[in-house]
């Protein structure tokens, strides 16, 4: 899977997948064979962090 390069678009993309299809970031990453750091790094750069209890980046 090619993740969006723009962090704001990545935020929307990931949160939509987490809301609609996956119970956790870990499951999303396993399913698409990507590292969690490939998602969390760019989003941390714009001050968004994964909240497991909400299953989204806020």
Image (cartoon, helix red, strand yellow):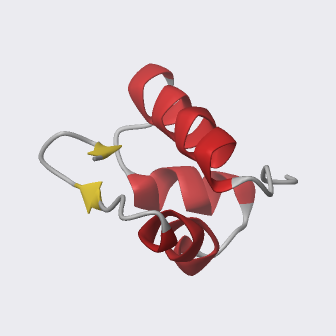
Across and down, in percent, residue 33 comes to 73, 65
Give the residue furthest to the top. Answer: 20
Say left or right for 23 vs 54: right
Across and down, in percent, residue 2 comes to 87, 54
Seen in the picture, residue 6 relative to 33 is either above or below; the reply is: above
Q: Residue at x 58, y 60 (%)?
A: 29
Name the one closer to the observer, 38 or 58.
Answer: 58
Seen in the picture, residue 28 relative to 16 is either above or below; the reply is: below
Seen in the picture, residue 57 relative to 54 is either above or below; the reply is: below
Say left or right for 25 vs 49: right
Q: Which residue is drawn at 64% across and 73% down?
A: 38
Q: State which quadrant residue 54 falls in.
A: top left
Name the one closer to the observer, 9 or 22.
Answer: 9
Q: Which residue is drawn at 46% across and 36% down?
A: 15
Give the residue furthest to the right. Answer: 2
Q: Which residue is drawn at 74% across and 53% down?
A: 6
Across and down, in percent, residue 5 comes to 80, 57
Give the residue furthest to the front. Answer: 46
Across and down, in percent, residue 52 comes to 20, 53
Give the residue furthest to the left. Answer: 53
Say left or right for 6 vs 10: right
Name the one closer to the observer, 15 or 43.
Answer: 43
- The tally of labels here is 0
Say left or right for 51 vs 28: left
């Amino acid at each position: 899977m090619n993740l969006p390069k723009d962090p704001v678009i990545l935020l929307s993309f990931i949160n939509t997948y987490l809301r609609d299809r996956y119970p956790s970031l870990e499951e999303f990453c396993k399913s698409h064979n990507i590292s969690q750091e490939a998602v969390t790094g760019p989003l941390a750069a714009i001050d968004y962090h994964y909240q497991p209890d909400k299953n989204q980046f806020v």
